């Protein structure tokens, strides 16, 4: 290993360690790592900006964040939770099953952090009135949000990174990861329910007055914004589904990032006085975090470290496709439970890209599905495995429900293991059928 | 006698209320229940700030009195069933530091809290709240342990 490679690896590891320690804001850590690489002349600023920062990913995230900011500001998440709770007649058993499935569905199309910020808060509030233990429900919601997020390109940041870096569309994710994620979601909620079945107590001593006050219509803070947010969301999904067809057949360059960006900018243009508020609610920290990490991981790619890793893995598993994709999935799963899954997905994106074309290595697509399923689902295992977990965990603690690492792992690891086993089985079937 | 119950909303802190309340109810002590709302994680604080108005709307809609108030109200109710009337206090910050500050400010004779049988990962590195309180408290501390594990 030459000196630039060693410097790139050192900066990458230091960045990883400081992100994991959570003593310094992770965006500042990622940007510091990027600046260090530029100062050390591992990368030039021009290379970083034009080659390694993946602007398509940043654009798609910016568009989705804008639409989500509109929906959350309009009261969408509260409205959704109240409508579902009312339909379920405020029955805690039904809530345990259905709320996590709702979070899985929402997280398939939206950023799971915002979904869990609201659903953890709303589940706590509903549990306070219905007098049931909110912790198993919130942990199940997080698990299902992460599993549901695996099913689409926009469901989880690792999918956005892998999909756009390696050229896979929204429909590719829905077709190949979608069925696995749906089966895994139902199996995981079954296991989560079985684990907590004895703790669910249906109290008859309910706060009726407070329940009656929970009119879903009251949750909508701005009806115009609510309708516009839903319309923009629908248009973004429609564009994501049809963009490849529009590009190929009609010759219009409607790329994936433009799918959410076009409706997002329509709202910003039409929003009037609301535009400033919407712009303030976009998560710029995450965008900067991604920019910094793209440069840090770019340092590994440029200095040839990732190529060496790719060669090593390819040699280790040459010709043994099932062993390779299973190892990629489980390794991604375990690693994501321990370390931040964003830099991990970026690095793995380059690793599998560099492996393609070598003798005895399976197609890129099946390796993408392996890494994506492992990274998205494995993050459930610990309270720090994904940002959605951190937010839900801290939100419950703030409300006086300290979950603790042990209880989290007891509740989250069994459904996660079942979901990963189903994913592994799904990948094996795909490999056997040659459908990837 | 001035008694301070430190609670965190967990089943074990509820057990500390039952055990401590039962032991000292005949003495009719002056009781305070304290809950420390922990410093919110930086990432949660960031997202809460992004969606501040919407989260406030949820609190209003559900008539939530605010973090920690529900926990001390429940504790007060539990002690009330044992015939003890308790003052309620909510502090925000590092649990061990805030409990010690309250002990010093309130001039308590006895502090009662529950001890988790299994430490969390951060406890292994930084010491548990109970350890820190026991070591630095000027008042006597009664630590209520969890019920012994039952063999199946």
Image: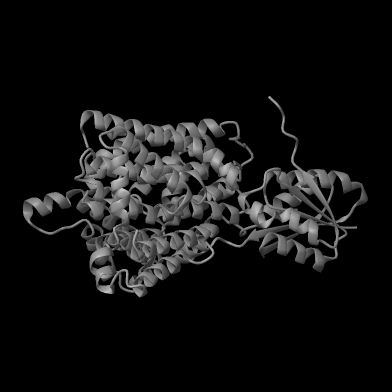
* Image quadrant where residue A332 sits: top left
In this rendering, the answer to whether A242 lies above or below B90 is above
Q: Where is residue A125 in the image (x, y as percent from the top left)?
A: 55, 50
* Nearest the eye: B125 or A430: B125
Task: Identify the image quadrant of the C terminus of chain A.
Answer: top left
Left or right of residue B19, residue A68 in this image: left
**The furthest residue to the front:** A2
In this rendering, the answer to whether A268 lies above or below A409 is below
* Nearest the eye: B126 or A180: B126
Q: Position of residue A231 (x, y in %)?
A: 27, 56
Is there any visible trace of residue A66 in the rendered image? no
* Image quadrant where residue A44 sits: bottom left
Q: Position of residue B124 (x, y in %)?
A: 65, 51
In this rendering, the answer to whether A427 lies above or below B132 is above
Task: Identify the image quadrant of the N terminus of chain A.
Answer: bottom left
Left or right of residue B32, residue A167 in this image: left
Q: Give the residue drawn at x 36%, y 75%.
A: A39
In this rendering, the answer to whether A320 lies above or below B74 is above
Q: Give the residue drawn at x 74%, y 47%.
A: B115
Q: Give the residue drawn at x 46%, y 44%.
A: A380
Q: Where is residue B107 in the image (x, y as percent from the top left)?
A: 85, 65
* Nearest the eye: A14 or A286: A14
* Image quadrant where residue A253 sits: bottom left
**The furthest residue to the top:** B152
Is there any visible trace of residue A78 in the rendered image? yes
């Amino acid at each position: 290993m030459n000196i630039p490679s060693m410097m790139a690896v050192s900066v990458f590891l230091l960045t990883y360690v400081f992100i994991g320690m959570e003593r310094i804001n992770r965006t500042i850590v990622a940007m510091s790592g990027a600046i260090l690489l530029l100062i050390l002349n591992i990368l030039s600023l021009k290379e970083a900006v034009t080659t390694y920062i993946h602007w398509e990913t940043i654009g798609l995230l910016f568009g989705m964040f804008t639409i989500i900011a509109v929906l959350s500001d309009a009261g969408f998440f509260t409205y959704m939770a109240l409508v579902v709770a009312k339909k379920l007649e405020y029955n805690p058993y039904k809530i345990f099953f259905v709320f996590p499935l709702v979070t899985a569905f929402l997280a398939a199309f939206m950023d799971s952090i915002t979904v869990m910020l609201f659903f953890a808060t709303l589940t706590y509030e509903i549990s306070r009135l219905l007098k049931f233990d909110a912790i198993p429900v919130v942990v199940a919601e997080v698990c299902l949000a992460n599993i549901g997020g695996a099913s689409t390109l926009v469901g989880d940041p690792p999918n956005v990174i892998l999909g756009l870096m390696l050229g896979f569309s929204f429909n590719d994710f829905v077709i190949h990861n979608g069925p696995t994620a749906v089966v895994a979601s139902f199996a995981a909620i079954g296991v989560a329910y079985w684990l907590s079945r004895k703790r669910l107590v249906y109290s008859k001593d309910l706060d009726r007055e407070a329940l009656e006050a929970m009119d879903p219509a009251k949750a909508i803070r701005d009806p115009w914004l609510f309708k516009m947010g839903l319309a923009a969301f629908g248009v973004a999904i429609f564009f994501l589904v049809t963009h490849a067809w529009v590009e190929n057949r009609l010759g219009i360059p409607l790329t994936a990032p433009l799918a959410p960006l076009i409706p997002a900018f329509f709202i910003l243009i039409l929003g009037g006085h609301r535009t400033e508020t919407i712009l303030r609610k976009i998560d710029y920290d995450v965008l900067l975090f991604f920019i910094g990490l793209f440069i840090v991981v770019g340092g590994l790619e440029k200095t040839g470290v990732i190529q060496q890793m790719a060669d090593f893995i390819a040699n280790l598993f040459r010709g043994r496709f099932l062993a390779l994709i299973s190892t990629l999935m489980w390794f991604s799963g375990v690693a994501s439970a321990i370390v931040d899954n964003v830099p991990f997905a970026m690095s793995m994106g380059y690793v599998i890209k560099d492996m393609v074309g070598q003798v005895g290595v399976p197609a890129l697509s099946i390796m993408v599905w392996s890494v994506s399923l492992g990274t998205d689902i494995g993050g459930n295992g610990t309270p720090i495995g994904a940002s959605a977990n951190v937010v839900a965990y801290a939100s419950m603690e703030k409300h006086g429900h300290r979950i603790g690492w042990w209880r989290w792992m007891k509740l989250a690891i069994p459904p996660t293991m079942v979901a990963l086993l189903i994913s592994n089985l799904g990948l094996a079937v795909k490999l056997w059928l040659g459908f990837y | 006698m001035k008694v301070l119950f430190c609670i965190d909303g967990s089943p074990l802190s509820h057990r500390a209320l039952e055990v401590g309340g039962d032991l000292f109810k005949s003495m009719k002590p002056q009781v305070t229940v304290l809950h420390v709302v922990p410093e919110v994680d930086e990432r949660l604080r960031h997202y809460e700030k992004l969606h501040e108005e919407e989260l406030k709307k949820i609190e209003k809609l559900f008539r939530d009195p605010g973090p920690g108030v529900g926990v001390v109200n429940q504790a007060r109710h539990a002690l009330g069933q044992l015939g003890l009337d308790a003052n309620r206090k909510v502090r925000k910050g590092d649990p061990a530091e805030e409990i010690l500050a309250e002990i010093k400010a309130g001039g308590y004779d006895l502090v009662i809290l529950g001890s988790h049988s299994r430490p969390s990962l951060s406890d292994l590195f930084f010491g548990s709240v109970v350890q820190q309180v026991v070591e630095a408290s000027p008042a006597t501390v009664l630590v209520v342990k969890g019920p012994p594990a039952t063999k199946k």
